Image (cartoon, rainbow, N blue to C red):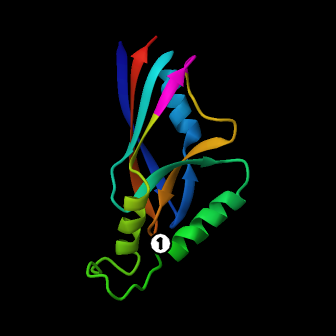
């Protein structure tokens, strides 16, 4: 059994989905794990991770629109407002999604469906440097 860990730094330009499938796939192949499990974990409370369709950008547009309607800025009942109007909605969006994803590895590659990609989902309006931890464990 082998394992490896690394951290990706993902620069964001504000709210939206940022595909990280390629660097994650490269991490797995560089570590020569044939069969195992990849864990992807984001170290923040105002962004999240999603596995989503990567063939049609309309999916991203619709997801962003959905979350804008589901958790809008300007909810006047929120108490945590010291970091701006987008901060607490970003925390709520992250709570509704996920900060960690497990992906099986088979034949040396993460097992994604035909149209699946892995995304960092930035919930804040201003740019950030996001830290995504990758951990792989398995057999060569």
Which residue is located at x 54 percent, y 76 percent?
69
Residue 37 image position (x, y, % from top left): 43, 26
How many numbered tags mark residues here? 1
Image spot of residue 53 (x, y percent): 65, 48
Q: Position of residue 72 (x, y in %)?
A: 47, 78
Q: Is residue 25 visible?
A: yes
Q: Residue at x 42, y 65 (%)?
A: 93
Look at the image and give the residue range highlighted in magenta: 103-108
User: Which residue position holds label 1?
Assistant: 125
Residue 31 on the magenta segment: no
State the predominant SS element of the stretch in magenta.
strand
Front one among 98 and 81: 98
Question: SS of the residue at dot 1?
Answer: loop
Question: Image quadrant for the N terminus?
Answer: top left
Residue 104 belongs to magenta span: yes
Give the side of residue 73 with respect to residue 109, left or right: left
Relative to 112, is 64 above or below?
below
Q: Residue at x 44, y 20 (%)?
A: 36
Residue depicted at x 40% and y 53%: 130
| Image position of 70 with respect to 118: above or below | below
Residue 46 lies, in percent from the top left, at 37, 62
- In this rendering, is residue 129 above or below 31? below
């Amino acid at each position: 059994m082998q394992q490896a860990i690394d951290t990706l730094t993902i620069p964001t330009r504000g709210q939206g989905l940022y595909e990280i499938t390629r660097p994650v796939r490269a991490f797995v192949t560089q570590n020569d794990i044939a069969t195992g499990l990849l864990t992807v974990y984001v170290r923040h409370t105002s962004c999240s991770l999603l596995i989503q369709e990567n063939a049609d950008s309309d999916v991203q547009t619709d997801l962003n629109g959905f979350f804008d309607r589901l958790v809008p800025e300007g909810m006047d009942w929120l108490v945590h407002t010291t970091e701006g109007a987008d901060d607490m909605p970003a925390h709520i969006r992250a709570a509704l999604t996920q900060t960690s994803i497990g992906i099986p590895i088979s034949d040396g590659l993460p097992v994604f469906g035909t149209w699946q990609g892995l995304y960092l989902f930035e919930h804040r309006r201003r740019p950030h440097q996001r830290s995504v931890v990758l951990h792989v464990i398995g057999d060569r």
